[in-house]
Structure formats: structure tokens, C-alpha cells
Amino acid sequence: MAEVTHVAFWAPSAALDGRIVGYLEERQAWSRDTAVAYMPPRPFERRRLARLQRSGVVVETPGGLFYLNTALLDARAERRRGLVLAGACLAGGSAIVSMVAALLGLV
């Protein structure tokens, strides 16, 4: 049950990160020169923005504008793809082992 609770809290956070990143992507805020103003209306959104800033994915200029650090954003996406692939491989491997064990009468 604790695992479900963890996922329940993680999913909205990831979606919110996606909305913040999407906002900046739509406005093509890729550098200091193309940075845009952004002030999330709700406190929890401001906390997620601060988290993205701490991770370096979102950068704030001295003038209070924001842009995306595309190198870190790409690295983060690549890392997540790797985790999904690793999880799929583990699940597939487990299924194969179970089928072989059943065929051999070990289960």
C-alpha cells in the first residue's frame, strides 16, 4: 500500500513539472536572451518551480525571468528513458524466468 501512496504523490508532481517546462518550451525560453516572466499562481507550483531551479533545469536571470537549461533537460529525459527501459527489461526477464520454471515443473 505504501508503494501506491508514493506513486500517487509522484504523478501529480511530475505532471506539474511538465506543465512548468511546457510553459517555458511554448515560449521558446531556451537562453538568457529568450527568458520569459513566470510566476506560478499557487504555493505548491512555486515550490515545484524552486525544485526545478535547484536541479538546474530551470534558470532564473537576475531580472527575475526564467529559461530552460536544455542540456540538463535533455540529460534528465535520457535518464528517465533509461529507467523505464531498465524496468521493462526486469519485468520481461522475470516473466521469462517464471515461464521457464513453470515449463520445467519447478513451480
Image (tube, rainbow, N blue to C red):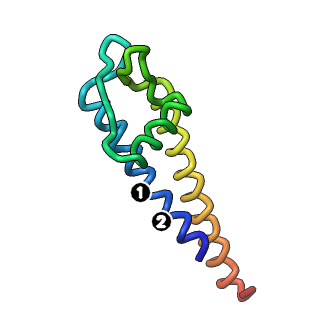
Number of residues whose C-alpha sits closer than 10 Å to that of mark 1, classed few (under 14), some (14–19) or many (20 or more): few
Tell me the tag on residue 56. Answer: none
Q: Quadrant of residue 49?
A: top left
Kind of residue sitting beneath label 2: Ala
Residue most extreme to the top: 33
Could you say where residue 79 lies in the image, as x and y percent from the top left?
55, 40
Could you say where residue 101 lies in the image, as x and y percent from the top left?
70, 80
Could you say where residue 4 lies in the image, as x and y percent from the top left?
53, 71
The vertical placement of 81 against 21, above or below, is: below
For the point 49% across and 61% down, which residue is it?
A: 9
| Mark 1 element type | helix
Could you say where residue 1 lies in the image, as x and y percent from the top left?
59, 77
Q: Which residue is mark 1?
A: 12
| Relative side of 60 to 102, left or right | left
For the point 51% across and 64% down, which residue is it?
A: 7
| Mark 2 element type | helix
Check whether the beta carbons of the residues at disc 2 and disc 1 lie within 8 A of each other.
Answer: yes
Residue most extreme to the left: 27
Nearest to the observer: residue 87 or residue 43: 43
Nearest to the observer: residue 100 or residue 15: 15
What quarter of the picture does the C terminus occupy? Answer: bottom right
Kind of residue sitting beneath label 1: Pro
Nearest to the observer: residue 17 or residue 51: 51
The CA distance from mark 2 to mark 1 is 7 Å
| Relative side of 46 to 35, left or right | right
Q: Which residue is mark 2?
A: 8
